[in-house]
Image (spheres, rainbow, N blue to C red):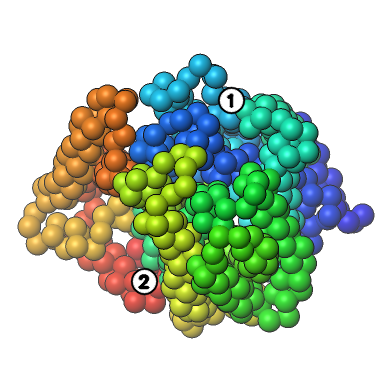
Amino acid sequence: MDSADAKITGGGATTAAYTSHQPLSLKTKILYGAPSFAGAAMIIPILINMPKFYADVVLVPLGFLAMAIAIARSLDALSDPLMGWISDHTHTRLGRRRPYMLIGAPLCGVAFFCLLNPPAVFTGGRAAIWFGVTFILYFVFHTIYVLPHYALGPELTQNYNDRSSLFAWRESFTILGTIVAAGAPGVMIGTFHLSQRQAYFRLGIFFGILVTVLYTLLVVTIKERPDFVARESNPLVPGVRRALRNRPFGILLASYVVGSIAGAIPATMMPFFNAYVIRPPNPDVWLSKLLVGYFGLGFLSMPMWVWIARRIGKLNTWLASFFLGISGGAAMFLLRPGDIHWLMVVICWAGIGFGAGLFLTPSMQADVIDYDELYTGKRREAQYTAFWSMLPKFIAIPSAAVPIAILASLGYKANHVQTPQVVFAIRAIFALAPATCSALSFLIAWRFPITQTIHNAILEGIELHGRGEVAVDPMTGASVPPPTPGHDEDVGWFLDYFSSGELKRYLARGASQPVRDVMRVATMSIAVSIISVIYVLHRVSSLRADPGAMISLIVVAGGLAFAIFVFHLMRLGPARRLAAGEVPADVVRAHLGQVVEAIREGTPERAVG
């Protein structure tokens, strides 16, 4: 912090007292961002190296790998909103975020080591079980620490440009960790002549310890802002509904969901594209070089993108970066065997664009959270972060698992020259699919409305609310009175357990209708989930036979159905309270009118008056 920063203590940590517009010190940015070095270094071998390692070295059938990936990522997506809600509602001496970093990081380090080091005696079915269990545990523990870490970022500063700088530092460490993890296997194998197992053993120990040390350092040196910790959080289900009515968030989320496909596919398919399409003389070494080139250019380009964003705005900068990814993906489809140096050029070109999205999207998301606070008076960083990550993860599940399953269905054979059909599938999936998704994501992002001027007006409105004065929504011109805690606001949040259609049916058909609506959807959802489980168990009754491509899609469908079931199960109690007449009919009608207005304007609605 700057020399003028006032010091406060609590929970065993000492740091500066933050204000909304006060720039963060370089020390704070580094301490916040450094843990991402280890986190990113762990995720790279898991998403890029492990599928091919388990397929070609441990000899696990591709269908089992695809199924395990789908199950693990489904559970990971389901745990995100739960972890966000838990973090937002936690009140300890350490705050809302730091306790979970202290718990989750070391557990994730252990799971990481186990995943990278399957017992040498395990092959086939037993190795598939080992992969599935450790893969699932890794992502569960990863959610426990990383979601509170990411939620902490928007709380540290509300300064428009300082947020870009903070997240640029975090993502710079992310890319540095990625570069190290991407290059380390190739260096160990090519220079020190280690086997893949020996290389992954050393990586597992080093990064498992490092992630624990860096997150512990963050916890003991950075204190959460006490004004944010003390703020009341909201119920989970109504919070989801209000987030979806936030038009800027909806645009940003939709663009990110579509764009996440462009990120998930290359991570899984690059080793296969390198080894079986380009076919360089030493695929493992060249894979490390390609990854270092991609992430290295992303890292080196970040100061340029920060400079551009300060001059033309976050959105215009983000839109400009899409061109590099789209053109790079299209160019890679044209490459043929032996074009390894051309592949390096195109990979580096695409990497420049990759660097922009890393820090711009979380910075823009933080601005969206401020807009939500203008209407609700609540800080919901973890919940927005959870919802931000949950939907893209569900979309990314088939993006990561289905390509592997497709290769298996087309006759992929480990460590062999592949058939023309398999080679074409690898080229199309790796190059054309991400380029198409990037183009669609660009078209969606074009409509994002929050500029620096609008964001400054949002913060001014929040300050007016703090003084009890009426603010103006800078995007719609609507007057926004300060949220007033009490009965009216509580009723508004309660009625947001229900959709507009459900409330209309309640008024038209009687008190028991909400319970029937909730039970019908919950029953259908759990039925789909159970059928999916039965189908999967039937197909994998023997670990000797590859379960095939369809199994991954069934797992995704079952995971989504179970998420819907849990969502509606949480609504059953409120539905019974509504059926008991807890809220008068005229209040329900007034709430419906405000919901219609909020949907039309794309804003979180105000409390029922």
Q: Nearer the viewer, residue 415 or 93?
A: 415
Residue at image point 9% right, 62% down: 508
Q: Which of 113 and 22 is in front in this view?
A: 113
The image shows residue 252 at horizontal and vertical percentages of 49, 67
Residue 567 position in % (x across, y down):
31, 45
Relative image position of residue 338 (x, y in whole percent): 60, 60
Based on the displayed image, in which of its 4 quarters is residue 450 positioned?
A: bottom right
Residue 454 lies in quadrant: bottom right
x and y percentages locating residue 601 in the rendered image: 39, 77
Question: Is there any visible trace of residue 401 in the rendered image?
Answer: no
Q: Which is nearer the N-term, disc 1 or disc 2?
A: 1
Q: Quadrant of the C terminus?
A: bottom left
- The amino acid pointed to by label 1 is Asn
Residue linked to disc 1: 117
Query: Which mark, residue 519?
Result: none
Residue at image mark 2: 598
Viewer-closest of 358 and 453: 358
Measure the C-alpha gap from mark 1 to mark 2.
52 Å
Left or right? Give the position of 359 relative to 379: right
Residue in view at x 53 percent, y 31 percent = 57
The residue located at (24%, 63%) in the rendering is 500
